[in-house]
Amino acid sequence: MSWNWHEELKEIVGSAIERKLNHLALEKQWENSASIHGLVYTESVTRGEILLCRKKFEDFKKSGMSFEQAKEKLVAEFSKRLLKVLLEMKRMEIDRLLPYTILSVSDLTDDLSTAHYVYLSKESVNTEPLTSSTREELRKLADKFPEQFPGGGDIMFPREYDMTFIVGFINHFYGRAS
């Protein structure tokens, strides 16, 4: 029996998304899901993520779910979407459907992807450059390839240290026999 890196990656992404949701004060978002009041984050990305959680939570509440059930469903839904997006980006890079790399690293860019390197050149103060550059590239890909990346902005990205690990994991194992 061989090791299935896809299953391992699924668990890693799920844990990362759960940590991110806990960072966003998930229980508070559940309690306030019907309103936009009480948002404690001013960064537009985080605010958008909170609103996305609240929108999903409102739907879950209407269906009669408990907080724990909703949290579990939210983690699963966001994890599945993130994993699908990242693996599709990687596939497109491998198949050379993109003019530059978003996830794959290069010796020419100090072991960063082209998109990450360019983003860092423009934006040196951002504390989450890999996540931000990937989010920015996803928006572009959603415009260019709407069938592969529907709803490009409605995605939850993990915190930077988790994103770095996930991208490294994908780069290491993608394309190898499992």
Image (cartoon, grey):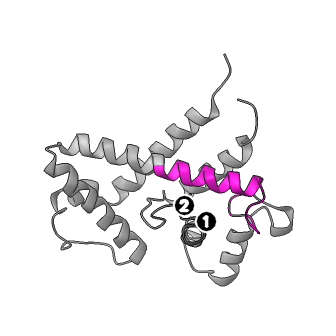
In front: 151, or 31? 151
**Three-letter code for the amino acid on which mark 2 is drawn:** Glu
Q: For the point 15% across and 64% down, which residue is it? A: 34
If you read the primary sequence from the N terminus, does the residue marked by circle 2 or circle 1 appear first? 1
Q: Quadrant of residue 142?
A: bottom right
Check the picture and name the quadrant holding the C terminus: top right
Q: Which numbered circle lies on residue 130? A: 1
| SS under mark 1 | helix
Q: Which residue corresponds to the image point at 81% horizontal and 68% vertical from the top-left?
A: 109
Q: Residue furthest right?
A: 108
What's the amino acid at mark 1?
Leu
Q: Taking 128 as reference, is 93 above or below it?
A: above
Measuring from the top left, give residue 15's x and y in whole percent.
45, 43
Q: Is residue 76 left or right of residue 59?
A: right
Q: What residue is disc 2 on?
A: 160
Say how many tags the image has.
2
Return the x and y of residue 93 as percentages of the image width and height. 73, 57
Residue count near mark 2 (Cα–Cα under 10 Å), binned few <14, some 14–19, many ≥20: some
State the SS at label 2: helix
The rendered magenta stretch, by its main secondary structure, is classed as helix
The magenta region covers 81-103
In the image, 16: left or right of 9? left
Please tell me which residue lies in front, 88 or 174. 88
Q: Are marks 2 and 1 in contact (CB under 8 Å)?
A: yes
Identify the residue at horizontal 60%, vertical 70% (top origin): 144
Q: Position of residue 56 (x, y in %)?
A: 27, 56
Q: Residue 59 location, x and y as percent?
A: 21, 54
